[in-house]
Amino acid sequence: MKADDIRFSEILNISEGMLDLHGRRLVLHSMDAFAQFRKDMIENWGLDQARRAFTRFGAFWGEADAGAMKRIFKWDNLSELLMAGPRMHALQGVTRPVVTALRVDKTAGRFNMQITWHDSIEAQEHVLATGESDKPACWILTGYMSGYASFCFGKNVYFVEHKCRAKGDRVCSATGNDIDSWGKEIQAHLPYFSTEDIHSKVLRLTDELKEKDRELERHRRQLMQLERAAASMPAEVRSESFRKVLDMAGRVAPYDSSILITGESGVGKEVLARYVHGLSRRAEASFVAVNCAALPETLLESELFGHRAGSFTGATENRAGLFEQAQKGTIFLDEIGDVSPAIQMKLLRVLQEREILRVGESRPRKVDIRVIAATNHDLENAIRNGTFREDLYYRLRVIEIDIPPLRDRPEDLLPLARYFVKQMASKLGKANLRLDATSLDHLSSYPWPGNVRELENALERAAVLCREEVIKPEDLPRSIVEGVPMGRSTADDLKRSLAEVESEHIRAVLESVDGSRTRATKILGISPATLWRKLKQD
């Protein structure tokens, strides 16, 4: 860094009521007010005491700026750091300094600087306060440069002003030397510098500001984590039971302990896992979700751990598994209770040794991941039945978080419903989509055995079928309107064939999209040919 490269806009943070120079609060003051202050000081304390106070003030200011410059920037050399002092004076509107000579020999302990101050505001203040002087009056400027240079050079340096506009000179100018180079000449000026304890105060202040910077950075990271977490848990939470779940998740998120999330199917176990990941120190890395029940054992092993080319039929190239893809991040193992004993053994090795073995390889690979697992099974009962390893269970269940079913937290139902309607509005291109008030009682009285997932699916169906972008009771599934959960069919339902149910649904979808078969096939997830065939059968 060079002194001329300093820009005030890059080191000064300005907001209403606050001027902040990297942790140091600054204040603007009027030259006229400071001139009056100087006048009062001289009249009440006398010229010598006023000069001593202003010189000490300048020395502390200079050392504080020097500490800030050393803390904020990395300098090309000592000379550039020293030149930053006059540069700061210029940026702060104190004067227009010109350094005419600078000789520094750190080894020999020799320092010399010649400086000229154009348009010194302090000289103007002194003339305003007392009129023209018979002696130099830039006491703050000399104190500042003395304090600044002493801090940077590591040895007492004193500046003495020779010319001053306050006594009629064209410009103000001063010489700065280390104390040994001054000799006896400096003795008359030393009483005005009382810097012996300033250096330690500035060092202490610098350490405090560094700690403040670290604290602000910690707070900034925490704020970013909270913002990420809010994005992953967007619906309002009203129930006390789910607030406790989120509180526990927030407390364990910063640590890498394994978590087992339990609860009925559809309660939002993956959503909670993403919430934990968003609050963790791994939030910037990947979150990888795996449905362990969706794949047979052979494919699941390859998906999780990867494989070497040629290790089995179809393995044409080396492939990294999901554990490796989640490196530095979080892997979420959903439906962990459905994995085979062989896979359980391999998962135990991952949790114990933090390493995986690709299919077809003998060399283990280290992984740095956090493991969050989830299940809707009773794993303790599975242990008793011999279908789940007890040691794996305790490795996964360092922290257990149980999510209550939706029926046990009815306060959260309407916020969730409104959130899903908003999501469907965006997904389906229905900008004004809303719930009719007559639908709310049906949603609130239904027991929701399928939990949040059932609610989301029911509202998507209703959003597709509704007219004029208003979800009414007739748009909701019959089971919700009649209060009979899916799987508990009415007598009339049991008399209908599967073909009749399918045909009714297809006609409803076509009606909702004004007969557009292209849009209907996208919603139904079938090909145009399949739709044509089913309509023909109808």
Image (tube, rainbow, N blue to C red):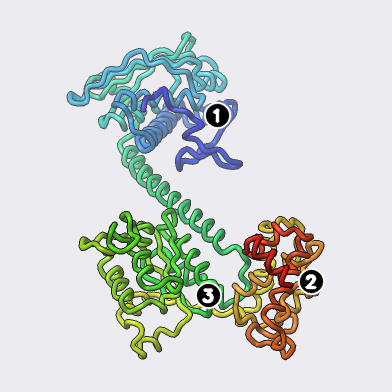
Going from the N terminus, do you reach mark 1 or mark 3 first? Answer: 1
Q: Image height check: is 115 above or below 244? A: above
Front one among 155 and 486 = 486
Q: Distance between the residues labelled 1 and 3?
A: 57 Å
Q: Looking at the image, which residue is at 78% across and 62% down?
A: 469
Find the residue positioned furthest to the left. Answer: 108
Q: Mark 3 points at which residue?
A: 244
Q: Distance between the residues labelled 2 and 3?
A: 34 Å
Mark 2 vs mark 1: give the one in front: 2
Disc 1 is placed on an element classified as helix
Give the amino acid type for the residue marked by disc 1 in the picture.
Phe
Total label count? 3
Give the amino acid type for the residue marked by disc 2 in the picture.
Lys
Mark 2 vs mark 3: give the one in front: 2
Point out residue 303 in the picture as x, y percentages from the top left corner: 37, 64
Q: Mark 1 points at which residue?
A: 34
Question: Can residue 290 be seen at all in this image of the molecule?
Answer: yes
Front one among 233 and 123 = 233
Give the amino acid type for the residue marked by disc 3 in the picture.
Lys
Point out residue 7 in the picture as x, y percentages from the top left corner: 47, 28
Mark 1 vs mark 3: give the one in front: 3
Question: Dot 3 surroundings within 10 Å: few (below 14), some, or many (20 or more)?
Answer: few
Question: Can residue 462 be seen at all in this image of the molecule?
Answer: no
Q: Mark 2 points at which residue?
A: 472
Is label 2 in contact with label 1 (beta carbons under 8 Å)?
no
Point out residue 35 in the picture as x, y percentages from the top left corner: 55, 26
Going from the N terminus, do you reach mark 2 or mark 1 first? Answer: 1
Q: Looking at the image, which residue is at 52% across and 70% down?
A: 246
Question: Dot 1 surroundings within 10 Å: few (below 14), some, or many (20 or more)?
Answer: some
Q: How far apart are marks 2 and 1 (CA)?
A: 73 Å
Which quadrant of the rendered structure holds the C terminus?
A: bottom right
Front one among 527 and 152 = 527
